[in-house]
Image (cartoon, rainbow, N blue to C red):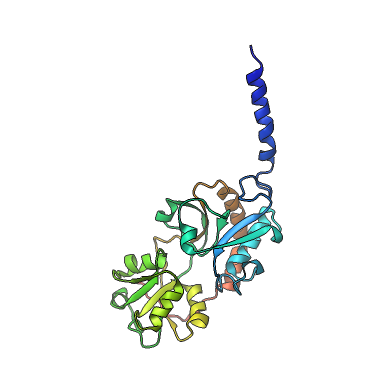
Amino acid sequence: MSLRPIVAALLTLGLALPALATERTPEDPRLLNPGQLTVGTGDPVFPPWMLNNDPSSGEGFENALIYALAEEMGFTPEQVVWVGNTFEQTIAPGPKNFDFAINQVSVTEARSEVVTFSQVYFQPDKAVIALPGSAVEGATSFAELGAARWGAVIGTTDLMYLETIIGVQDAAVYDDQIGVFQAMQAGQIDATLAALPTALFATAVQLPDANIVAILPADENDRGHGLLFQKDNTLVDWVDDALSTLISQGVVEDLVATWLLADPDLPVITD
């Protein structure tokens, strides 16, 4: 009997052992660049998700969460590397330039067909943003909201919410939130929709003449925000375990309380 197959098998096993030993460490060979955690996000980024357009500051809900997650996974802050992408680049199918991304990406069935998500780490309410005198001011039902002229960013769950929950069939679509706000200022649309934290920042900084006129319930088709991975990336189990630890320890809840404050007196429209 030839010993060659046995020797070959032993050599193969021996070569595999170092790689297995480094899994779930900063040198994990499954990382885009072993030795660092490469995290995708928006370009630019906005409060309260991240402050001062600087993910590396750790100031803001999402970047503070990433640094807590990185520590739980065994990375130092210096080993966290940020890469910026547009929202469309982030959610598109295909190879990624990050290990995972955090950019208020909602977990949906359609997206899950082309990318992989972690468990949900936050589910925000929706907020209606409008200028004074808008047709949506004083609205008390989805039917009244649906009669207005709406605008939203293409490819977002905000647009999906308008179409499937409120019943808006002719919403104007834009490449980014700035385009939506410019259309509102130009009188081309009456209102837009955004996650509540985004709306709070928008009405305080980006479009201070506008107001949040109502809060809407969470979309049953939108499970909340998750970390986004390239499809079938096996890192997701490691990240999910670390994220579960942060959730069970109350870290995520504390970060929500610190960075994502809501006005309890805002009116709520439920149907």
Quarter residue 154 falls in: bottom left
Residue 48 relative to residue 6: left or right: left
Q: Image quadrant of residue 98?
A: bottom right
The residue lying toward the viewer, choosing from 53 and 269, is 53
- Residue furthest toward the top? 1
100 vs 115, left or right, is right
Is residue 244 something that shows in the picture?
Answer: yes
Compared with residue 237, is residue 129 higher up or lower down, i.e. above or below?
below
Q: Is 57 drawn above or below residue 246 in the view shown?
A: below
Please state if 10 lies on the left or on the right of 185 as rendered.
right
Q: Position of residue 152 (x, y in %)?
A: 39, 71
Q: Nearer the viewer, residue 60 or 213?
A: 60
Taking the spot 62% from the left edge, 54% from the top edge, the residue there is 242
Do we see residue 224 in this rendering?
no
Locate residue 52, reporting x and y percent.
61, 75
Tally of marks:
0
Q: Could you say where residue 72 lies in the image, as x and y percent from the top left?
A: 67, 56
Q: Picture coordinates of residue 204 (x, y %)?
A: 52, 82
- Report the front residue among 20 and 271: 20
Q: Quadrant of the N terminus?
A: top right
Please name the residue shown 67% across and 22% down the image: 7
Is the C terminus in the top left, top right, bottom left or bottom right quadrant?
Answer: bottom left
